[in-house]
């Protein structure tokens, strides 16, 4: 056979592949390639590809998917050394991606925190406090740093009191931080912080944030948004340096157990990142970490310095496991909306600094992912970005507004024209009750999910966990489909289809972390990140979506979580 014949055959292959796709078949591994290492079959593979195809089997070689199709077709590819997993009819989805989580920070406390993510019963929460107090022993802290709100307790949705926590855990200091809204302390915790009747408040607490009764006795409540809760969190014990690796490992294991495999990480803390780097070298880093970082400025002088740093900043020097992909999440600190602010009024002089920073980013060709929550802030940022775009085009830089709880149709239209994206972090998943107290009926459209979906803009889900929000992806998906927060309270009106919700947690998020060629769908050529579910996401009643549990999670073809093989992690 002459060279020309070979060339002709080669050139025909793409056309043949296109025909197979049109005929409803899946692209199949070419026969001359090596047999797959692993074959998953007898499943309902929800591929989340461009046609939302459903397949039966997936073949994996090395860390990539090499074929997706029917049991019969893929069985032919198997060789003598191909390992097989029988899915027994279970559904499989791509590894879930959270486009914005403060993941690495959580490693510093995870092993010590008593998490309430997904706990929908107050009775159960109390049992967890009692069990933790007993396990820790007298005098040891029992605490969490956000990720829950009392409105999620279906049986008895009410706050904790000092007296109640004294009864539940009489021998332990207790601090339960409800999102970033308030913290509930018992008497031992108040004593540890030297918050006492007749004594002035400790210097590091925000003025007026320590609630006291008419007689001046502290009630145990510290309240007043992030600024008020932060001093409490700062005083709580972090894990010891020699425990940091174990704590980070427990964190990653919990993420894999929840079906999460990749993250946009707001602020990649150096100490935990170093551990991730080590695991990567050793071949057992079980989450993909795409950092959102860079030096935000708080003053015009700092902006001068930041602008110099931006000119030198290099992103995309990493790999599939760890990389820096965005400048963010803050650009100019005075314009960073507090979480529970009801309204913003961005000042012209501050916006000028914000624009200088944004201009430097555009000039350097850097992607930006910026915290933007309230409607006036979003409008003001878009004004600046439109001005920047006239001088340095931001097209293809994937500039992303993050959180966007109050985004509206007009703003989405402006963003679309600019080639921008929306990282949607529905704080209402746990904060919906609190937001209804502040915003009234306006909270029903925070976020306006159907409006965002209908706009046609590229958007994806994140949580902003682990303090501002809970981290469980099926809780987010259930919220998107039903409008209900854990515990069943209906908090938003605009819901979306399960398919659109899943897309926003997978394929679209792959784009929002710059890895659309590698992640977000179960397709030949993509990395083998996938999750086997205990029930079918597409067909179970909507109210059960929140209860879906992964039975197996895979990252790069490696099983990183297997419910059947859980001993060490589950016993924690
Ligand atoms: Zn933020």
Image (cartoon, helix red, strand yellow):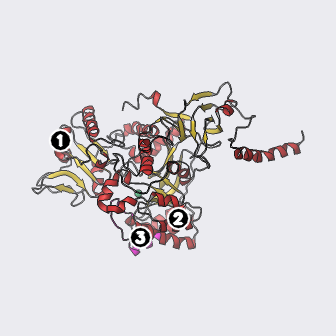
- Magenta region: 336-357
- Which residue is depicted at the point 28% across and 35% down? 132
Q: Name the outermost residue toward the bottom.
A: 348
The response on whether ligand 1 sits within 8 Å of label 2 is: no
Q: Name the outermost residue toward the top.
A: 80
In the image, ligand 1 is in what quadrant? bottom left
Give percent across and percent down for residue 277. 50, 42
Q: Check the image and report above or below for 184 versus 298.
A: above
Tell me if residue 497 is in the magenta stretch.
no
What residue is pinned by disc 3? 300
Tell me if residue 339 is in the magenta stretch.
yes
What residue is pinned by disc 2? 361
Name the secondary structure under disc 3.
helix
Q: Check the image and report above or below for 167 versus 434.
A: above
Give percent across and percent down for residue 62. 62, 35
The residue closer to the viewer here, 270 or 285, is 285
Q: Nearer the viewer, mark 1 or mark 3?
A: 1
What residue is pinned by disc 1? 166
Give the quadrant of residue 5. Answer: top right
Give the quadrant of residue 229. Answer: bottom left
Give percent across and percent down for residue 409. 48, 66
Give the quadrant of residue 181. Answer: bottom left
Of the image marks 3 and 2, the number of the one nearer the N terminus? 3
Q: Which of marks 3 and 2 is in front?
A: 2
State the separation of the CA atoms marked 3 and 2: 16 Å
Give percent across and percent down for residue 522. 59, 42
- Which residue is depicted at the point 40% across and 57% down? 493
Side (left or right) of 314 relative to 427: right
Name the secondary structure under disc 2.
helix
């Amino acid at each position: 056979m002459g060279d020309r014949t070979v060339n002709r055959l080669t050139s025909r292959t793409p056309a043949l592949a296109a025909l197979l796709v049109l005929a409803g078949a899946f692209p199949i591994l070419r026969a001359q390639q090596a047999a797959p290492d692993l074959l998953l079959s007898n499943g309902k593979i929800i591929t989340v590809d461009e046609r939302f195809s459903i397949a039966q089997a997936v073949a994996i070689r090395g860390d990539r998917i090499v074929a997706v199709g029917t049991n019969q077709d893929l069985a032919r590819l198997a060789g003598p050394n191909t390992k097989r997993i029988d899915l027994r009819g279970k559904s499989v989805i791509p590894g879930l991606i959270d486009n914005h989580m403060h993941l690495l920070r959580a490693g510093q406390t995870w092993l010590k925190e008593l998490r309430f993510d997904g706990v929908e019963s107050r009775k159960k929460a109390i049992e967890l406090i009692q069990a933790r107090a007993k396990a820790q022993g007298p005098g040891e802290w029992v605490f969490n740093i956000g990720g829950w709100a009392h409105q999620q307790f279906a049986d008895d949705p009410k706050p904790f009191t000092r007296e109640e926590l004294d009864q539940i855990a009489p021998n332990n200091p207790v601090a339960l931080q409800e999102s970033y809204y308030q913290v509930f302390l018992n008497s031992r915790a108040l004593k540890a912080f030297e918050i006492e009747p007749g004594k002035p408040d400790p210097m590091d607490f925000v003025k007026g944030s320590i609630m006291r009764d008419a007689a001046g006795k502290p009630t145990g409540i510290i309240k007043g948004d992030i600024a008020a809760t932060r001093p409490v969190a700062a005083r709580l014990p972090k894990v010891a340096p020699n425990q940091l690796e174990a704590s980070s490992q427990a964190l990653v294991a919990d993420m894999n157990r929840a079906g999460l495999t990749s993250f946009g990480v707001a602020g990649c803390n150096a100490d935990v990142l170093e551990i991730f780097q080590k695991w990567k070298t050793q071949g057992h880093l079980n989450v993909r970490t795409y950092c959102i970082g860079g030096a935000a400025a708080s003053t015009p002088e700092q902006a001068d310095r930041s602008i110099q740093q931006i000119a030198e900043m290099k992103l995309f020097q990493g790999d599939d496991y760890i990389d820096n992909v965005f400048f963010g999440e803050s650009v100019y600190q005075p314009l960073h909306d507090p979480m529970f602010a009801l309204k913003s009024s961005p000042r012209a002089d501050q916006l000028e600094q914000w624009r200088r920073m944004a201009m430097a980013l555009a000039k350097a060709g850097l992607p930006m992912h910026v915290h933007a929550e309230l409607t006036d802030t979003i409008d003001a940022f878009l004004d600046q970005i439109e001005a920047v775009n006239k001088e340095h085009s931001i097209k293809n830089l994937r500039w992303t507004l993050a959180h966007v709880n109050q985004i509206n149709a007009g703003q989405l239209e402006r963003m679309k024209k600019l080639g921008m994206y929306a990282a949607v972090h529905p704080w209402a998943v746990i904060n919906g009750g609190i937001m209804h107290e502040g915003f009234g009926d306006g909270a029903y459209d925070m976020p306006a999910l159907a409006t965002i979906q209908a706009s046609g803009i590229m958007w994806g889900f994140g949580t902003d966990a682990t303090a501002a929000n809970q981290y469980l992806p099926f809780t987010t998906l259930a919220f998107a489909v039903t409008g209900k927060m854990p515990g069943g309270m209906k908090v938003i009106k605009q819901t979306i289809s399960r398919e659109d919700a899943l897309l926003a947690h997978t394929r679209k998020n792959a784009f929002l972390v710059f890895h659309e060629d590698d992640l977000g769908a179960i397709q030949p050529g993509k990395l083998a990140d996938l999750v086997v579910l205990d029930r079918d996401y597409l067909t179970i009643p909507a109210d059960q979506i929140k209860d879906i549990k992964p039975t197996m999670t895979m990252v790069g073809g490696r099983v990183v979580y297997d419910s059947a093989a859980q001993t060490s992690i589950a016993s924690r």
